[in-house]
Amino acid sequence: MNAHLKLVILDRDGTINRASEEFVKSPEEWHPLPGALEAISRLNHAGFHVVLATNQSGLGRGLFDMAALNAVHAHMLKALATLGGRIDAIFYCPHAAEEGCSCRKPAPGLLQQIEERYGLSLIGVPYVGDSLRDMLAAQAAGCAPHLVLSGRHAMVDPVSLPPEFPVNTRVHADLMAFADHLLAAAESTEIPSRSPNP
């Protein structure tokens, strides 16, 4: 991977699928949000690589095990593949909040793992999530924070965010609205290039 990689980092629960206070513990409990998988597919087709960064404290709390988490993700990836989309990698924090790890958002550890894996700076890379802790993790890692109102902060006023949010947070109704925004911005800044070699 190189510095020219077009990367988008996404949260999972509340961004791609419905969040649950009881946690998503099985494929049967995983329900995609309207348009979310289609949005990822659109990003892929526009040349963006999509990576997940998700807190999964249910592991640390013993609510589900790795086999269950892998089954949920296999189900998600299969549903996405039917729409021609893909997620390149899934980075997750398995720790409960009281464990004091460096990877549980709002700490930037997961994003730093992505930076290390891909060998590129995350400065300005879009990070899309549905919560304050997502936005704080994005800010700490130098990402561009994008809040979607499809999860935990659905009732936030998009025009006047609470002061604890990073000042450069952009707000979108959902993941499809973010994709519309990003693809329009990419289109307006692209420099025409020669046709690729056959």
Image: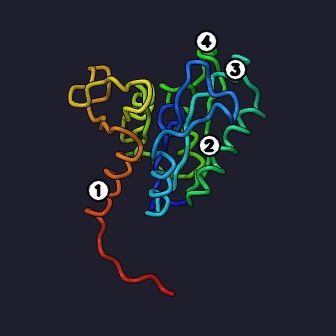
> Badges 1 and 2: C-beta atoms under 8 Å apart?
no
Q: Is residue 179 above or below residue 28?
A: below
Residue 155, quarter of the rendered image: top left
Residue 102, quarter of the rendered image: top right
Residue at image coords 31%, 29%: 166
Q: Secondary structure at mark 3?
A: helix
Residue at image coords 47%, 36%: 15
Q: On the image, numbered disc 4 is attached to which residue?
A: 98
Q: Amino acid at mark 1?
A: Ala
Q: Amino acid at mark 3?
A: Gly
The numbered mark at residue 90 is 2
Residue 198 position, x and y percent, is 51, 87
Q: On the image, numbered disc 3 is attached to which residue?
A: 60
Q: What colouring does the structure picture have?
A: rainbow
Residue at image coords 40%, 28%: 136
Q: Is residue 138 left or right of residue 184?
A: right
Q: On the image, numbered disc 1 is attached to which residue?
A: 185
Q: Which label lies toward us, 4 or 3? A: 3
Residue 6 position, x and y percent, is 45, 58
Distance between mark 4 and mark 3 Cα atoms: 10 Å
